[in-house]
Amino acid sequence: MVSERSAVQAEVLVASNRGPVSYGLGEDGGLTAKRGGGGLVSGLSAIGQSTRGAERLDEGQRSGDGQADAVWVCAALGDGDREAVRRTGGVLDPGDTGGQRVRMLDIPAEVYAAAYNGIANSVLWFVHHMLYQTPLEPVFDAEFRAQWAAYETYNAAFADALAESAADGAAVLVQDYHLALVPGMLRERRPDLRIAHFSHTPWAPAEYFAILPDDIQRQLALGILGADRANFLTRRWAENFLACAETGLGGQCERVRPEDGAPGIVALVPERKARTTWIGVHGLGADAAFLRERAHRPDVEERMTALRAQIGGPDRKTIVRVDRTELSKNIVRGMLAYRQLLADRPEWRERVVHVAFAYPSRQDLAVYRDYTAEVERVAGEINAEYGTPGWQPVVLHVKDDFARSLAAYRLADVALVNPIRDGMNLVAKEIPVVSDAGCALVLSREAGAHEELGAHALTVNPYDVTGTAEALHEALSMDEGERAARCERLAAAATALPPARWFLDQLQELRG
Ligand code: G6P
């Protein structure tokens, strides 16, 4: 397949559903840009630090030959984004993106909704996080097939845009389950490119992945195996992917272990194309320098004062959690564990507050709206049951506010991170880095972060409410010296692979 090339050819391209900026549309028609953060943003801004990246960037800038250092391709997510694409032709103002070159794709709204809400968030997210209540769901019927066709169209739009914007032999880093078909599609369009795929989620065990229709399993496996490198957050997810690829391709692939036995690297050779895809593990860490600086700015101090007032009494301990209101985060069982703690250990009443931030997420999906309502209902019940005039047992905030999250991180005595299943969970890594007095971490064994942090945390089975209540008691009772020492070890492990390094490692590996 021959593809059109655009005027600007990039050496490095990143593709993800959600880009580094999104736009709100005011009633007066004005657009307000809201910049995001995260590992990719730090990683891309660090490209200039990599030797080869810096050389190429200089060459491109000197020659003025239409070479760009990096381009980020993402989707328009809502009306504001669509309007921004309409006004700019999709090449966004670098002033809005922090200097980043961004190409935003306006995929027709109904195609986008079917791909994003229908397939990505209601099927692939559910499979990898094992969220289905299987007696009634999933149902793979005609509606599913129509949504799958939209998912293919949406992936093809990304593959087209990447093929147009990539310089010869460019490195393309494709992100997450939204774009699982892109590596295969892009390889067909541009065999010269070096392509990586990164899964930010867990990967399902083979027996669970087998819920999906056979042809869909095969398409997903072949999609990702179109990449030269398929990267994961932990070895466990990488192993699951290998097992699923073997099942999905019905034995048409073979594992190859390199002779030096380098950890985490295994290869698959799909028979017909006899290509090798190298499997890698890159455990994204917290950005200590950014977090520590940001957490000491005046807006965070202000919010600490407000939170302290809500918590009350100076000697009260805090159990902090910060999540999207996401089904896999297990917020409700966390609250039930807290309720059990108050019931079984009355000595903690009036002496502890559960500070829970549950920020809106994926509210187009009814199941997420219902879950949000359930979180609010259970918090209200606990407050009604145990609250006193001077003590509100649960302080729940549902409006997203990064400065307030950092304020809670600093005040945390105990961090509660109990997901049913999670690719990594950066909150588990961030709180110990920022906590003022040193916090204890109650951590689900099913979070990817457990591989690195488990040795210094209190491990819980996320379904075991009684066990979680006991772990909360143990964490609250921990001697301050031990807590601080553990917290230091947690922070060291959490920051071992900062976002810029995480990204540059993948880029260097890809360029070979
Ligand atoms: C997870 C996914 C990301 C996604 C984020 C927020 O972390 O791995 O790809 O961007 O959730 O979800 P949303 O649907 O709001 O983009």
Image: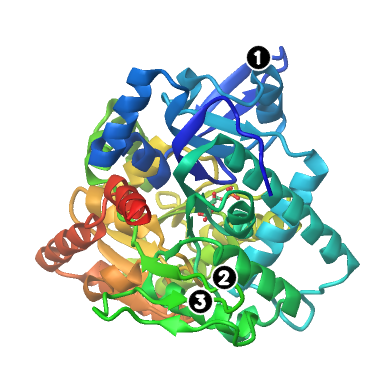
- According to the picture, the residue beneath numbered tag 2 turns out to be 129
Left or right position of 370 against 400:
right
Label located before the other in sequence (3 or 1)? 1
Q: Amino acid at mark 1?
A: Gly
Give the label, 2 or 3, closer to the camera: 3
Give the label, 3 or 1, closer to the camera: 3
Q: Residues within 10 Å of mark 1 (few under 14, many from 20)?
A: few
- Percent coordinates x, y for residue 467 in the rendering: 40, 82
Label located before the other in sequence (2 or 1)? 1
Ligand 1 closer than 8 Å to label 3 CB: no
Which is more toward the observer, 179 or 319?
179
For residue 455, which numbered disc appears in the image?
none
Q: Amino acid at mark 2?
A: His
- According to the picture, the residue beneath numbered tag 3 turns out to be 269
Is the Cβ of the residue at disc 2 closer than 8 Å to that at disc 3? no
- Percent coordinates x, y for residue 211 in the rendering: 70, 80
For residue 30, which numbered disc appears in the image?
1
SS label for mark 3: loop
Q: Is residue 185 above or below residue 473?
A: above
SS label for mark 1: loop
The residue shown at (32%, 38%) is 47
Is the Cβ of the residue at disc 2 closer than 8 Å to that at disc 1? no
